Image (tube, rainbow, N blue to C red):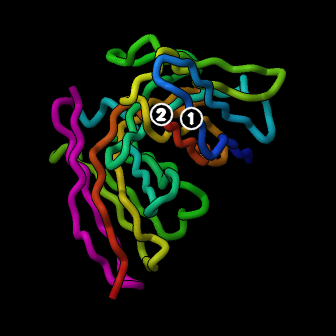
Amino acid sequence: QVQLQESGPGLVKPSETLSLTCTVSGGSISSYYWSWIRQPPGKGLEWIGYIYYSGSTNYNPSLKSRVTISVDTSKNQFSLKLSSVTAADTAVYYCAGGIVGGDYYYMDVWGKGTTVTVSS
Amino acid sequence: NFMLTQPHSVSESPGKTVTISCTRSSGSIASNYVQWYQQRPGSAPTTVIYEDNQRPSGVPDRFSGSIDSSSNSASLTISGLKTEDEADYYCQSYDSSNPVVFGGGTKLTVL
């Protein structure tokens, strides 16, 4: 059974870059399209983007200018970088494994999430 | 682009049946699969329905999903409600310009 674990700093200063890594265990990095999703305190879910092990990516248009998702197949990890953060980027960040079809995408497995606070 | 609209909250008694709706603002609900995720307080989401009406292994058959083209909506129905079903539920579908569209979430209270 695939398991996911997010890691990274819990506190980031405004205007800096948020960096998180998700480690995949119990399965192959080629098993899924790997997503990042976030949830601001008390609010709903927002999809950030996904990557395939080949390096192919797809981003939420509302965040695209600030987001980079990358994959390291040798370490079974994928990563998120979000630049120029503000307090509005404070959220729980989840990594997830998703299934892609011609006209669908959905999450199959989720990490436990990690809280990131943007504050000086 | 489209939006998915869910009721903010629903409540029902243990043992009863509840249905949560998810209405698509434009385009046909039948055009793209709908998924449902359960998020218990303080926990990560988990998938309870995928591809409109399929249950992942381990999800009890008290959970079922359907779509209704006449109302352009999807529904999650939970029968034989248990207190452990109390959670937030999110629907999700696909848009070619933004592959993952979430509904705003529905808080289910089992009282």
Residue under label 2: B111
Residues at discs 1 and 2 in contact (Cβ within 8 Å): yes
Q: Residue at x 15, y 47 (%)?
A: A75
Q: Residue at x 25, y 57 (%)?
A: A21
Q: Residue furthest bottom?
A: A120
Chain designation of label 1: B
Q: Closer to the camera, A49 or B52?
A: B52
**How many neighbours does mark 2 have within 10 angstroms: few (below 14), some (14-19), or many (20 or more)?**
few
Residue under label 1: B11
- Element under label 2? loop
- Element under label 1? strand
Kind of residue sitting beneath label 1: Ser
- In the rendered view, does A106 fall on the left or right side of A23? right
Kind of residue sitting beneath label 2: Leu
Residue A52 is labelled as: none
A14 lies above or below A60 = below
Q: Where does the magenta region start and end?
A: A1-27
Q: Cα distance, mark 1 to mark 2?
A: 7 Å
**How many neighbours does mark 1 have within 10 angstroms: few (below 14), some (14-19), or many (20 or more)?**
few
Q: Position of residue B11 (x, y in %)?
A: 56, 35
Residue B84 image-quadrant placement: top left
Q: Position of residue A92 (x, y in %)?
A: 36, 59
